[in-house]
Amino acid sequence: MLAVLPAVTGQLGGAGDSISQILSILFYVIFIVFLFYGQRIQMYVMIREVEGSLYKLKYIKDEGRRIAIETIKELGKPQTDPSARVDRYLDYFTISPQSMDPAGIVYKLDHILDVRDTRLKDEVKLMAPASDEVQVNNLENTLEAAMALNYIYKVVRHYYIQGKKTLSLYIIMQLQMILPLVMKEAEAYASALKAFAYGQPIGDGVGPLVAAKLMHGYETRKVPKDCVVAEVPLEGRTALIMKAEGPGGNVGKPGDAIKAVIEENKGKIAAVIMIDAGLKLEGEMVGEVAEGVGAAIGGPGVDQYKIEEALVDYHIPIYAVIVKEDIGDAVSPMRKEISDSVDKVIERVKSVILERTKEGDKVIIFGVGNTIGIGQ
Amino acid sequence: MSENSSSATTKISTYLTMIVLIVLALSMVALISSVNLFVGGNEVAAGYLLVIGLIAMALSLYVMVQSRKRIADMKIEAPKVMTTIECRKCGFKSVREFQRGDFVFKELDPCQKCNEKMLITAIFKEVREREKPFAF
């Protein structure tokens, strides 16, 4: 456009002469500036874009902290102001075990995660002494969401400042390129905060919801760790329905729970069916149900390892049914489409049982996920 | 401290507002001058001033709208979460707004119709899709 400007203004003639000269000079100045400083200008535009997102991240992070403190004050009735303790909690970190010699690393990681869980729960109990077990779990989840937001903000700020200090286009460019995904995740955690604070079921809870629907009305007993199991007759088989113990925010330890139930039954299990929320690809519908094989479970991999280990020992086949949703849906209050998919999942589970097992067999059905807001 | 900094991020900067207002005022002056020049017979200069005035006005309004949009974008909408309550005996069903303490399979007060205990069967949020549908 700048290239045609002098030509256009040149045709105006008369009064346009002086203006066309000014525009021509302006055109050359802009051309030279862009020739030498184009990359720098591009970088400043990117920095500005990152700055805008950083403002939003800061706002979200501060909101997260505020909601966490307010919820602790409301539920925990602490004697002193919990703000300082919350700030300390938000900066907690976990060091993963050394992996130079990877043998036995799963159990080392499991131990560190157990220590972390106990430590954080104790911290919540100190912050909110009046809260019951369910509220402690919900508060822990709320604080973990606030912790994630705090971490995202700090990392983005780190690269932003580093990019500005070094004026490195490549640092800023990388940050600017992944920023839409980072923002999406931060927004998901922001909506998760309120869900956790109020104890509302989240999208990730679709597995426990299916299990709860199957086991409701039957006697349940606790299995290690933080899980429950119920024996339910289903299509002529005995289904051992399992989930994390609700309604507090809890994922339990499905690896230990499945292993314990398999050992209780001396390995005489015809199949294990796992139900979980699965990340959908763009273009797929929220609440779509898909079926496959393998241990449907996320997280650091400890539980998946334990489940696979137990299944290999007894040669038990494992099937998976997942409900498609994106990361935002998984951590925010459960969408209607996901809640409505429960009956479809039950139908799929029944068809797997009918096709893959014989009458009188025992099957394990595990609803994997955070059981916040879902009883049994 | 964080509350102050948080509110600072949600306000339009006074510096920006001042610049926008000054540009807006100058664009108004340019438009009025263009009318005067047009009446005076100097159509070329009036044309230039009209274009400059309109561009300046459009730019200042755009900057104003964008900065307001940025603040609106920063607020995270809390979706309305609903609770479905059902009577397992007579099938009576009602949907109300979520209340703290609700959870799926929680037993509530007896049913108005059959006196059987009501049960929370679902808790969900309804999302209005904003995304444009794609052809694939």
Image (cartoon, rainbow, N blue to C red):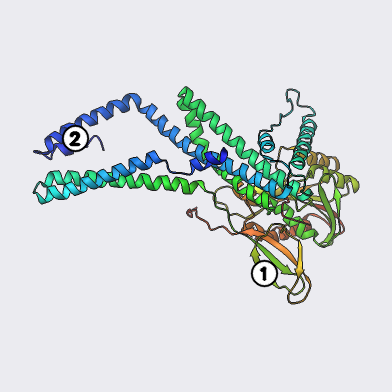
Host chain of mark 2: A
Q: Residue at x 57, y 52 (%)?
A: A284
Residue at the disc numbered 1: B94
Viewer-proximal residue, A152 or A298? Answer: A152
Viewer-proximal residue, A100 or A320? Answer: A100
Task: Determine which quarter of the picture holds residue A84.
Answer: top right
Residue at the disc numbered 2: A6
User: In the rendered image of this protein, does residue A303 appear above or below residue A338?
Assistant: above
The amino acid pointed to by label 2 is Pro
Query: Are discs 2 and 1 located on one and the same chain?
Result: no
- In the rendered image, residue A348, in percent from the top left (x then y), is placed at 71, 58
The amino acid pointed to by label 1 is Ser
Q: Does any portion of residue A181 appear in the rendered image?
A: no
Q: Nearer the viewer, mark 2 or mark 1?
A: 1
Task: Determine which quarter of the picture holds residue A253.
Answer: top right
Q: Quadrant of the N terminus of chain A?
A: top left
- In the rendered image, residue A301, in percent from the top left (x then y), is placed at 73, 38
Is the residue marked by circle 2 packed among few (<14), some (14-19), or many (20+) residues within 10 Å?
Answer: some
Q: Residue at x 12, y 49 (%)?
A: B38
Q: Which mark is residue B77?
A: none
Host chain of mark 1: B
Q: Residue at x 42, y 40 (%)?
A: B13
Task: Determine which quarter of the picture holds residue A237.
Answer: bottom right
Left or right of residue B78, residue B25 in this image:
left
Q: Does any portion of residue A328 appear in the rendered image?
A: yes
Viewer-proximal residue, A90 or A277? Answer: A90
Left or right of residue A98, residue A224 in this image:
right
